Amino acid sequence: MVGETQDPRGTRVTARLRELRFDAGSLSLNLIATVGRRPVTPIERMGDVQRLMAWLDGVGIRIHPAENTTTLLAALHDLRACAYDVTAGYLHRDAPPERSVRMLNRFAEPEPPAPRLDLDADGLPAADPSGLSAPLVLSTVSRDLITLLSDPLRRQEIRECDSEVCRMIYLDTTRGRPRKWCSMQRCGNTAKAARHRRQHPKAAAGPTP
């Protein structure tokens, strides 16, 4: 079938599973979401420079034109790994590896520039044409996660999708009943359909010829 591949573990990888996710609720969690189906059958969603640029565009980060995007991609993969270790450790009440904590703090050391509003010739807000250096991109993402985890109220909103084949980490800002799935349209509907098939196996099998 067009748009599908098979990974070495036998998992059917569809185009939808490879889609970048921008609905995790924060910049750093969106980075963690560039790997799907953790931790059983991880699917890489940001494996090349083209996907890196699509992710940066999706989260609204501009990089300096002179930056080495291949080097930045490798560094973001390193940051993503330690960000997942630290966040999953919090969710599962396990202390994360000290190496991951040190790396996260090291990535956060550069001071991002202060926000600045410039006006164009018409007196309207103008976009910053310069963009961020690679260290500042890494610092911006790292600081987002550190700020999130350091806030006693906000970190209580961190959830892990209830779907065993997803486990995406997301921020649940809904009030009232906590969300069980990262997305009702994705994992929620899939889980409901699977439950219906278990409860009504004959209907799921279709009419007997």
Image (tube, rainbow, N blue to C red):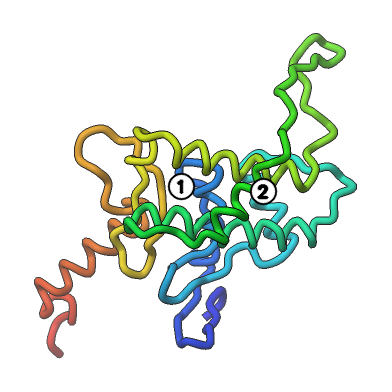
Count of labels in the image: 2
Give residue 152's mark.
none
Left or right: 193 in relation to 186: left
Q: Nearer the viewer, residue 182 or 97?
A: 97
| Residue 179 placement, left or right of 109 | left
Quarter of the view holding residue 77: bottom right
Q: What residue is at 74 percent from the left and 17 percent from the top? A: 117
Placement of 109 over or under 126, stated as above or below: below
Judged from this view, the residue extending furthest toward the bottom is 209
Residue toward you, 163 or 199: 163
Q: Which residue is mark 2?
A: 107
Residue carrying label 1: 24
Label 2, secondary structure: give it: helix
Mark 1: give few (<14), some (14-19) or many (20+) Cα within 10 Å. many
Question: What x and y, as percent, mark residue 185?
Answer: 35, 53
Does residue 6 lie above or below 14 as drawn? below
Mark 2 is surrounded, within 10 Å at the Cα level, by few (under 14), some (14 to 19) or many (20 or more) other residues, namely many
Name the kind of residue labelled 2 in the image: Phe
The residue at the far right in this view is 66
- Residues tagged 2 and 1 counted as in contact (Cβ below 8 A): no
- Residue found 13% across the figure and 75% down from its top: 203
Determine whether the residue tagged by mark 1 lies in a helix, strand or loop. loop
206 w.r.t. 131: above or below: below
On screen, residue 38 versus residue 62, left or right, reads left
- The percent position of residue 159, horizontal first and vertical second, equals 34, 50
Q: Residue at x 80, y 14 (%)?
A: 119
Residue 3 quadrant: bottom right
